[in-house]
Amino acid sequence: MTKLPATTFQLRFQYSAQEWKNPERIMYQTRLVGVSDYWSEPSNQSEITYTQLAAGEYEFQVRASAPYGADEYTSFSFIILPPWWQTWWAYTLALLLLIGVIYGALKWRFEFLQKQQRIRDRAEFSEALLQRKKQLLAEVSHEIRTPLSVLKMQIEGLEYNLIEDTEKTYELLHRRISDINHMIADIDQLAMTELSELSLNVKQMDAVTWLKNWTLDAQNRMDQTAEGRFDYMLDLPMSLIVDADKERLTQVLNNVLSNSLRYSTPPILIECKATYSETHYVISLSDSAPGVSEEELALIFSRLYQSERNKSLFKGGTGLGLAISEDLINRHGGMIEASHSPLGGVTVNITLPR
């Protein structure tokens, strides 16, 4: 089968029959299979021209008719090759190009949406940060106003000689100033933790030794109050080595213990329990009555939060200790939560990864 290039514009076929006596009486019929299946009208013309044939397979057929009858047809088969843009590799290339264009468009769209989302997230974050800043300033100004008012009254009393026991007044002033300094230090630390500027000094430590030392310190602290008892149970393997910032975790336990001492009525009972599993270990601190309501359990880790019904038991503090503790535990990859204590107060559970 003859193959002709795609640039073939015109084909001309010439044919003749072997008739020597009366060649003028010979009639020809032709057809081009692939264009038409019908024979042409008989004609004495001995050539035919085809132009602009499409790519494909063809068979040219011709037959002659003479007075003695019609001959069998003679054929010539040929293929007109397609242009390069109609070949399989051109289609494959076009498909790959189309897939690339679609992929590029989708990628651009995805990146554009991501950029828009980042812009919205930054705007929302900035707005949320501004609102938190306003809220913190309002809360801090409210908390500082009370001790400052007391300081002002006491200083005016000293100024105008209205106070007889000046030594006790100076002691009160000293205590109030210490409370304000403590609050400012807590606010500074809370701000640093929220801005992720307070780095953790994470090292491997012996969890059992650390907890034993802390419980001994807690017992000594309870003995100094002469108002209750501190019990502990450490159900931990002696070989428990964890990655943590010992100083910050000690700060968390001290904050929780201080909170229990402030809001518990004598005789105070505090229990510390430590358990473990394959993936984490849990430190629980439970205190005695009074407890808090179900709604307040989710609020005690809020900044400057104080239980309304237990405010009469308040013995100093800034109201920021548990908020700082929550942030420190979260930065250790752990979790801190509160629940009702079987002793009648509150249980704080600290879950940390092993």
Image (cartoon, rainbow, N blue to C red):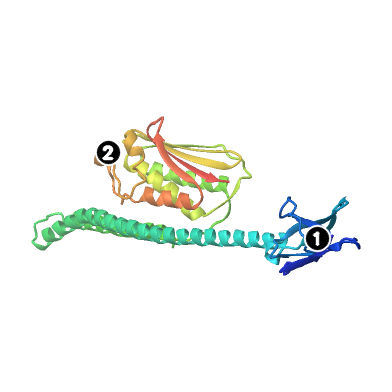
The disc placed on residue 62 is none
**How far from the left and from the top, in percent, is residue 250?**
47, 50
**How far from the left and from the top, in percent, is residue 98?**
60, 60
Residue at 50 percent of width and 47 percent of height: 334
**Amino acid type of the residue that numbered disc 2 sits on in the rendered structure:** Asn
**How far from the left and from the top, in percent, is residue 46?**
80, 64
Residue 326 located left or right of residue 40: left
Residue 256 located left or right of residue 213: left
Query: How far apart, in angstroms, are the residues tagged by discs 1 and 2?
Result: 103 Å
Residue 339 located left or right of residue 10: left
In the image, is residue 341 above or below residue 19?
above
In the image, is residue 317 above or below residue 229?
below
Q: Nearer the viewer, mark 1 or mark 2?
A: 1
In the foreground, 314 or 191: 191
At mark 1, the secondary structure is: strand
**Residue picked out by circle 2:** 310
The disc placed on residue 78 is 1
Can the viewer see residue 236 in this picture? yes
**How far from the left and from the top, in percent, is residue 216?**
48, 44
Can the viewer see residue 347 in this picture? no
